[in-house]
Image (tube, coloured by chain):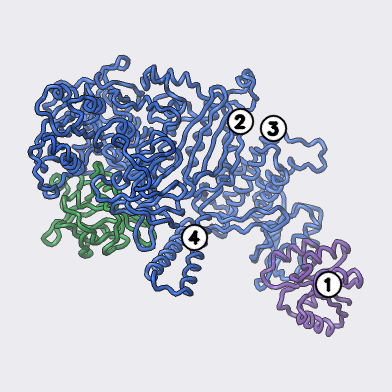
């Protein structure tokens, strides 16, 4: 599957990319919310793994834009502990699920598979 | 009668304070006198941030005041006062109170109000203070000096 | 199932439910009373109530909430209208739900509750619960989550619930949907009812806990972070900060000269941080007045209904903040004033129509801050006060003579309404009565150093204007030294400080004054006002303006401005009205914070425009007002109104055995302990039949309480109407009367000599002879007039150590007659104020006017306390006013007056 990773930390993107590619997925990268929205429109990935805190446009706003233009979009939030309220906002904005950093590989893959149907 | 008494001395007299009512003993408290107050009020002392009234029985006992050497912190938390005494003696478990009719008529009325029991304590007369002593002292403030 | 049957996991849970429900019900109620009603907010409130109630399985609760919600649902109802019936329905529902919270009950309804248990290792159960709700709500709309959906953002529990309305959806489908959510450990359908245990409910959660709240955001966003903190904890934090500042102060003090700039910086920073923290914490003690205001619209609505009047209350300035301690106690007086406005102010709808006024009466409650005070205004557009009627009444009751009543300004007449006993003397309706008269309102405000006055236009309305101290805790103060004391004034009240030499201080024929524009401003020595004998050296003049009081005080030194934390002195209430608190300074000294209004005699500037002294208080008129009351023998007795602080409807007396037989015990009056003296026993009468009233009086600068059977009214009498009691009665030790008056309407009124009575209950202390100097004063002669035998004895005893010679008179008339003919004349007069035939004021005025006696010093010896009478005294040129009974002050004053140079020269 084509999966879009949005995170401003290069290291995080690298780790996720490795994990996903090992499971057989194709990975696209965006470094901030704006890029993520643009890339989604262009590339139409199956799933988006969206970090919450990013410059230019944060994850919740990006999720809202993406889900508004594509109601069937599957966005999974990636967040740190203590951002519970923001995640709820994200879900209200259209996100389907979330994983918490530091994440377990199984969780991430499980979430993707669950929603990718 | 279960509770003990903290015996104190004021002038030549001995009193007993119910131990449950006394929360602290202060030595040489710094007291600021307040003008235009009755003589039973020695002034104000600040104890751990709280400004408390210092009551003194010296005038009621016809004793010259001098400086307040020790004070008992009476009551808890809210509604607390300090009672000035000259010396703190010991703890004593009261026994054999003297029947009221034998002493009430002999003691000045204003003081009777503050005393619940009288005892013979080791060659002296010991007067037990009521638990709400500060209230009683205030209630008998009918004159100002 | 009903609220009272719920078995709670913890008290906290129950409290939380109750608190939240109360808040939501409040929102519904307030909203219903507003025009137009905020439908969205009310809808949400009903909705949330439904949800929480549903969580507990409160079937009837949910049913009610649902019906209210339905009734307010405008969707799909184009003809929907907000009607008075709908308003009442909402209010009734609120009442019913409140009743359920209090344990009163009824019957049940249909939803299923699903319990979801989340994995304890799940980091964000709130989001999971939210996902669950979203999923199920999509299937079955109207599903409610517990905790409520918008609270899940903050939630980190383990068990959440979904209250799902009955529907055709298969439970298996619900189950499968739920199972798709991660971290879900168990799902249970809660079918069986919970156990029954009546829960004890104390419905009174008043301002015992503090709430630190941030502004509410609109729905859909996060819910607010509120923390409940006990008032004690807040107090402890404040104390800790106070001590921190103290430590800082001490450090500064110790390091004053030798301080390294780097260290100084840190010290300054420390201080600023501590002050900031203190400020923040103090702000937490401040609550917006809305906390009080919110309850009033409903109260007014109910009162108006009962009275069959149409009344609308509007409030403004509710965001104005006030110290919670003050606010707590403000509730009752404010409510009383509002009731007053409804009852006596606003007219009935018919009357209003006839008068051309809008049918709905308006009451406006406004709050704002100005000049260091919080101001409250209660305005109504009702009937107002009929000043002419009040004038007539004043004359009829004997409060004023016809002449005085004519000349009295509205301000002065308004003051009459605040006098003690007025409300009990009149018939008060059930609504406004209950012992909270205007006199009590004023007494309460006096206590917290606030004020109240009334303005009104006949036929148009009345306004009560209340002034409150803004905060009792922290302020910038000007510190001064006078005598041995360090004192402080709020900096907001200090107008000017000047060097005495440059101030233009001059004597105004005896009274020191400085120019204030063109008029003189009297100057008082602060040290003298506090304690006449104390050593002091006036160097500066401080001009104070506090509300309507303007004064100039001389002090020994000015220490400058400082931020201070003011603490009330515990145990001193009522005894020192001039002391608003104490402040601990850096060097360990205590500064006494002064309320200038209660220290300085009323100045001319307090009596607004007119130069005319208050007709009621005109000195030398030989008149006084009596409050007439009855005791168990049915006889009428009188007490001087000046000495009466208030009249309370009843007393809870704590009996104290073994004290003086006339002492009943003591009672608590607004936090002050007041001894209760039995007039009945003192006069040998039967104990009172019924509850009756209690007179709260002020004698000898202290407060006492006297139970009486009935309070009648106030009358104005003149001292020459008072006849002394026949000599025959003097024999016994029951001379408790000053005299007898034969009032034309009321008949015989006996005047009780309260000082005599009190002197027997608690004799004053006399100075030890050695304390007085050994100057030889034996060639001086002092004339003393006092009708009370005991008082004469006391004065004699006080002056004996001085060695002067006396002549005693039992009334003013006698002394005056002797002054005309005697030779030699005395060197000093000491006169009591209250005497039959000729009172002290009149006597003093005559003595000073007569050429024969003009040069002889006069001391007024009076038991009248309070600042009312200070005004009268200052109108005369007496040399000293001494309050009874202070033997050493009397002795030293006499000594001082006798040692004045002019006397030595003449004699």
Instruction: Tell which tag, 2 or 3, sits nearer the viewer.
Output: 2
Q: Please report the residue visible at 32 percent of the width from the left and 54 percent of the height from the top.
A: B44
Chain in purple in the render: A
Q: Which residue is mark 4?
A: C278
Q: What is the tally of numbered marks visible in this picture?
A: 4
Which circle's residue, 2 or 3, is located before the other in the chain? 3
Alpha carbon of mark 4 to alpha carbon of mark 3: how far?
A: 48 Å
Identify the chain of the residue marked 3, using the numbered disc in the image. Answer: C
The quarter of the rendered structure image containing the C terminus of chain C is: top left
Quadrant assignment, res A7: bottom right
> Mark 2 and 1 residues: CB-CB less than 8 Å, in contact?
no
Residue furthest right in the image: A42
Q: Residues within 10 Å of mark 3 (few under 14, many from 20)?
A: few
Quadrant assignment, res C383: top right
Which circle's residue, 4 or 2, is located before the other in the chain? 4
Alpha carbon of mark 1 to alpha carbon of mark 4: how far?
A: 49 Å
Instruction: Tell which tag, 1 or 4, sits nearer the viewer.
Output: 4
Q: Residues within 10 Å of mark 1 (few under 14, many from 20)?
A: many
- Residue C91 shown left or right of residue C506 in the figure: right
Alpha carbon of mark 2 to alpha carbon of mark 3: how far?
A: 18 Å
- Element on which disc 3 rests: helix
Chain in green in the render: B
- Element on which disc 1 rests: strand
Q: Which residue is mark 1?
A: A48
Instruction: Tell which tag, 4 or 2, sits nearer the viewer.
Output: 4
Q: Which mark is residue C84?
A: 3
Chain in blue in the render: C
Instruction: Tell which tag, 2 or 1, sits nearer the viewer.
Output: 2
Identify the chain of the residue marked 1, using the numbered disc in the image. Answer: A
- Residue C299 shown left or right of residue C576 in the figure: right
Q: Which residue is mark 2?
A: C362
Q: Please report the residue visible at 56 percent of the width from the left and 48 percent of the height from the top.
A: C288
């Amino acid at each position: 599957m084509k999966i879009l990773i949005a995170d401003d930390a290069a290291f995080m993107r690298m780790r996720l990319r490795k994990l996903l590619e090992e499971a057989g997925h194709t990975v696209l990268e965006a470094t901030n919310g704006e890029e993520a929205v643009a890339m989604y429109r262009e590339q139409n990935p199956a799933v988006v793994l969206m970090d919450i805190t990013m410059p230019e446009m944060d994850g919740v706003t990006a999720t809202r834009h993406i889900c508004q233009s594509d109601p069937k979009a599957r966005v999974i939030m990636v967040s740190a502990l203590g951002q519970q309220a923001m995640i709820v906002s994200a879900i209200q904005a259209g996100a389907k699920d979330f994983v918490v950093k530091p994440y377990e590989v199984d969780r991430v893959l499980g979430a993707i598979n669950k929603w990718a149907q | 009668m279960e509770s003990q008494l903290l015996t104190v001395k004021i002038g030549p007299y001995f009193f007993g304070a119910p131990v449950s009512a006394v929360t602290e003993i202060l030595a040489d408290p710094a007291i600021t006198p307040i003008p235009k107050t009755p003589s039973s009020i020695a002034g104000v002392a600040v104890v751990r941030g709280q400004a408390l009234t210092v009551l003194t029985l010296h005038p009621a006992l016809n004793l010259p005041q001098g400086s307040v050497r020790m004070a008992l912190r009476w009551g808890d938390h809210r509604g607390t006062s300090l009672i000035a005494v000259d010396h703190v003696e010991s703890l004593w478990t009261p026994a054999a109170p003297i029947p009221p009719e034998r002493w009430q008529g002999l003691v000045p009325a204003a003081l009777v109000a503050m005393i619940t029991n009288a005892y013979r304590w080791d060659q002296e007369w010991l007067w037990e203070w009521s638990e709400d002593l500060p209230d009683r002292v205030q209630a008998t403030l009918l004159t100002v000096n | 199932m009903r609220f009272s049957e719920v078995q709670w996991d913890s008290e906290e849970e129950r409290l939380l439910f109750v608190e939240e429900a109360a808040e939501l019900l409040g929102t519904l109620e307030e909203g219903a009373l507003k025009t137009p009603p905020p439908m969205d907010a009310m809808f949400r409130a009903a909705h949330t109530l439904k949800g929480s109630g549903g969580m507990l399985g409160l079937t009837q609760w949910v049913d009610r909430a649902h019906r209210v919600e339905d009734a307010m649902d405008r969707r799909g109802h184009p003809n929907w209208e907000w009607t008075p019936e709908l308003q009442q329905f909402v209010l009734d529902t609120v009442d019913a739900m409140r009743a359920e919270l209090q344990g009163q009950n009824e019957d049940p309804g249909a939803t299923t509750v699903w319990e979801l248990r989340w994995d304890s290792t799940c980091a964000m159960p709130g989001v999971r619960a939210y996902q669950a709700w979203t999923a199920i709500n999509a299937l079955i709309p109207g599903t409610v989550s517990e905790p409520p959906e918008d609270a899940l953002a903050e939630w980190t529990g383990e068990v959440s619930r979904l209250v799902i309305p009955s529907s055709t959806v298969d439970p298996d489908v619900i189950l499968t949907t739920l199972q798709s959510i991660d971290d879900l450990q168990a799902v249970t359908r809660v079918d069986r009812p919970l156990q029954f245990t009546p829960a004890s409910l104390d419905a009174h959660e008043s301002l015992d806990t503090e709430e630190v709240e941030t502004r509410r955001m609109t729905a859909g966003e996060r819910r607010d972070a509120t923390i409940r903190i006990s008032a004690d904890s807040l107090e402890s934090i404040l104390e800790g900060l106070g001590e921190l500042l103290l430590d800082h102060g001490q450090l500064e003090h110790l390091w004053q000269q030798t301080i390294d700039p780097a260290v100084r910086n840190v010290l300054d920073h420390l201080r600023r941080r501590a002050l900031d923290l203190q400020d923040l914490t103090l702000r937490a003690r401040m609550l917006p007045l809305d906390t009080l205001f919110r309850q009033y619209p409903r109260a007014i609505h109910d009162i108006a209904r009962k009275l069959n009047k149409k009344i609308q209350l509007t409030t403004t300035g509710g965001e104005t903040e006030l110290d919670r301690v003050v606010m707590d106690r403000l509730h009752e007086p404010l409510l009383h004033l509002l009731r007053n406005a409804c009852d006596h102010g606003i007219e009935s709808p018919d009357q209003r129509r006839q008068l051309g006024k809008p049918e709905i009466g308006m009451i406006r409650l406004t709050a704002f801050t100005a000049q260091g005070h919080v101001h409250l205004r209660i305005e109504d557009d009702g009937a107002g006060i009929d000043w002419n009627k009040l004038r007539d009444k004043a004359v009829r009751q004997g409060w004023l003579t016809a002449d005085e009543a004519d000349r009295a300004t509205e301000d002065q007449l308004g003051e009459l309404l605040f006098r003690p006993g007025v409300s009990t003397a009149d018939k008060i309706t059930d609504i406004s009565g209950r012992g909270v008269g205007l006199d009590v309102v004023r007494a309460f405000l006096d206590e917290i150093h606030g004020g109240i006055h009334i303005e009104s236009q006949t036929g148009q309305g009345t306004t009560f204007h209340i002034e409150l101290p803004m905060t009792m805790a922290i302020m910038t103060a000007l510190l001064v030294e006078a005598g041995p004391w360090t004192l402080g004034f709020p900096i907001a009240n200090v107008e000017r400080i000047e060097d005495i030499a440059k101030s233009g201080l001059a004597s105004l024929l005896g009274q020191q004054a400085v120019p204030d524009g063109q008029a003189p401003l009297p100057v008082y020595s602060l040290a003298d006002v506090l304690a006449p004998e104390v050593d002091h050296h006036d160097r500066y003049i401080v001009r104070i303006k506090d509300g309507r009081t303007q004064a100039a005080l001389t002090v020994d030194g000015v220490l400058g401005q400082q931020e201070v934390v003011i603490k009330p002195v515990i145990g001193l209430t009522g005894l020192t009205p001039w002391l608003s608190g104490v402040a601990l300074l850096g060097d360990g000294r205590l500064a006494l914070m002064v309320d200038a209004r209660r220290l300085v005699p009323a100045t001319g500037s307090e009596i607004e425009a007119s130069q005319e002294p208050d007709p009621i208080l005109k000195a030398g008129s030989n008149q006084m007002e009596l409050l007439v009351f009855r005791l168990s023998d049915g006889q009428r007795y009188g007490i001087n109104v000046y000495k009466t602080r208030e009249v309370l409807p009843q007393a809870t007396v704590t009996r104290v055995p073994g004290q003086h037989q006339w002492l009943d015990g003591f009672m608590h009056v607004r936090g002050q302990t007041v001894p209760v003296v039995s007039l009945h026993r003192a006069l040998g009468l039967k104990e009172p039949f019924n509850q009756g009233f209690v007179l709260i009086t002020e004698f000898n600068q202290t407060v006492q309480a006297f139970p009486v059977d009935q309070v009648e009214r106030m009358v104005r009498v003149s001292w020459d109407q008072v006849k002394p009691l026949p000599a025959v009665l003097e024999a016994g030790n029951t001379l408790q009367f000053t005299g007898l008056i034969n009032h034309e309407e009321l008949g015989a009124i006996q005047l009780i000599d309260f000082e005599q009575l009190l002197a027997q209950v608690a004799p004053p202390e006399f100075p030890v002879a050695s304390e007085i100097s050994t100057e030889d004063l034996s060639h001086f002669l002092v004339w003393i007039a006092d009708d009370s035998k005991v008082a004469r004895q006391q004065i004699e005893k006080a002056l004996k150590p001085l060695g002067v010679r006396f002549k005693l008179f039992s009334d003013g008339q006698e002394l005056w007659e002797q002054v005309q003919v005697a030779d030699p004349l005395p060197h000093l007069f000491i006169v009591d104020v209250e005497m039959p035939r000729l009172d002290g004021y009149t006597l003093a005025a005559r003595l000073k006017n007569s050429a024969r006696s003009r040069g002889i010093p006069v001391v007024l010896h009076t038991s009248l306390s309070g600042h009312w009478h200070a005004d009268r005294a200052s109108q005369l040129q007496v040399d000293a006013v001494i309050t009874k009974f202070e033997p050493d002050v009397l002795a030293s004053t006499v000594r001082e007056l006798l040692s004045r140079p002019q006397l030595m020269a003449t004699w």
